[in-house]
Image (cartoon, rainbow, N blue to C red):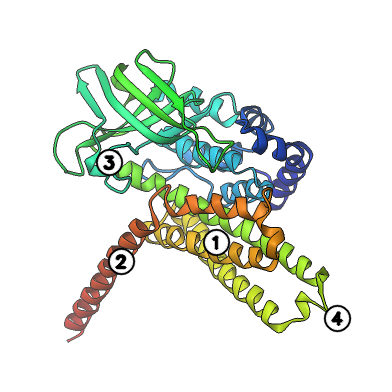
Amino acid sequence: MESETTYRENLSAWLRAVVYPQVAELEREQIFPREIVRQLGAQGFFVPCLQPAEAVSPRALPLNARMFGILIEELAKTRCFGLTLTVSIHVGVFLPLIQRLAHPAIREQLVHDGLRGALLGTIAATEANVAGSDFMGMECSATVDGEQVVLNGHKHYITNAAVADYVVVFARRAPGRHFANFSAVLVPTDRPGVSATRLDMAVMRTAVTSRIELDNVVLPATSLLGRKELGISYFLQHIAVERLSGGIWAVAVAEQCLEEAQRYAAERVIGEETLWERSAVRHRIAQAVVQVTLLRALVEQALTATDQTRLVDPFSSAVIKAAVAPAMESVIGTCLQLQGARGLEADSPLLRLLNEFRVFGVAGGSTETMLDVVGELWATRAMQAAGAELEARSVGA
């Protein structure tokens, strides 16, 4: 496998030659960058991010976290956020789910084509009538009957469902609010009974946020991913990758914004001095640098742990997810304020960034939901640590 440095250099050079020149048009015309995704795969940029099935245990995520982190970081720098979101879900969540859990009869071909950009996958969990944080309130049903699965219901606010070739649908297999009542099902989007429509969104405009309808969709039992009763477990394990990805993404863009803000402040003359020569301005930028440095440290720690354990720690990913939206609101807000009225023009890049990053406070688990998760996991760990300490003392006595 190529080194991380070589991978980053090759990827960055390719993006600068192929993607950067297209971003303005893609954003303006709201064009889904399917051909770019295909080319990224064809150039081999997805392959280093996925571990071979035989290289990891079935309980581990077959993701090379460091390579995946480089991929997301370099894509984020293009500021084509629909492209970054698409690749984050396809490479970071969909393909690892297939590699780890799909039936052997279909896994190899799907992974092969997915890594090479020949097919596109996504996941579908949220529904219009159910709060995004209420997984157990899910209404979409998966009836498992002998050799087949029948899906009914809908999913809402799903990334790229209207343009994807496959969707991993999380659905209810039994009534009641029990963790074992949900399954993960692999659904080809060209299957009879499947229809998807694009939703008109003000953010992530180059992604295709969609609603997908499932009307008596009949699938073979081999479409079930892993054990039929572990859908929630699989979702939580793999959505943690998306949350970590958001932290990687945010750090890359925040660092860009701060570098641009510093250059602007150094060039902008007010009276007889530049903005940068004013200590109040330097302090504001420095405070933002501290925020981003702390966020990067959290992300780096999580990436290192993920490569060691082959699992994304749910506490770390929730902390990162809870930190991203408020940190970016503060950092981008600081950069925007320094520009004065110029930052409020209709085509202001910083205004667009501010709106885009507000998505991170909602999608993939709201900031409030993440704070609940952080509190619960922190308290549980604290109690476990206290219990272990008491046990150690009793043994010592």
Residue 188 found in image quarter: top left
Residue 223 found in image quarter: top left
In the image, is residue 262 above or below residue 248?
below
- In the image, which is nearer the foreground, mark 1 or mark 2? 1
Q: Secondary structure at mark 2?
A: helix
Q: Are marks 1 and 4 in contact (CB under 8 Å)?
A: no
Q: Earlier in the sequence, mark 3 or mark 1?
A: 3
Quadrant occupied by the C terminus: bottom left
Q: Which residue is mark 3?
A: 130
Q: Earlier in the sequence, mark 1 or mark 2?
A: 1
| Residue type beneath disc 3 | Val
Quadrant occupied by the N terminus: top right
- Please give left or right for residue 390 compared with residue 46 in the image: left
| Percent of width and height locating residue 133 | 31, 49
- In 3D space, how far apart are the residues under numbered discs 1 and 4 (Cα atoms)? 32 Å
In the image, is residue 257 above or below residue 187?
below
- Please give left or right for residue 189 compared with residue 300 in the image: left
Q: Point out the residue furthest to the top here.
A: 192
Q: Are marks 1 and 2 in contact (CB under 8 Å)?
A: no
Q: Earlier in the sequence, mark 2 or mark 3?
A: 3
Q: Which residue is mark 1?
A: 328
Q: Point out the residue furthest to the bottom here.
A: 397
| Residue type beneath disc 1 | Met
Q: Which residue is mark 4?
A: 272
- In 3D space, how far apart are the residues under numbered discs 4 and 2 (Cα atoms)? 50 Å
Residue 212 found in image quarter: top left
Q: Secondary structure at mark 1?
A: helix
| Residue type beneath disc 4 | Glu
Residue 186 vs residue 35, the one in the foreground: 35
- In the image, which is nearer the foreground, mark 2 or mark 3? 3
Q: Which residue is mark 2?
A: 375
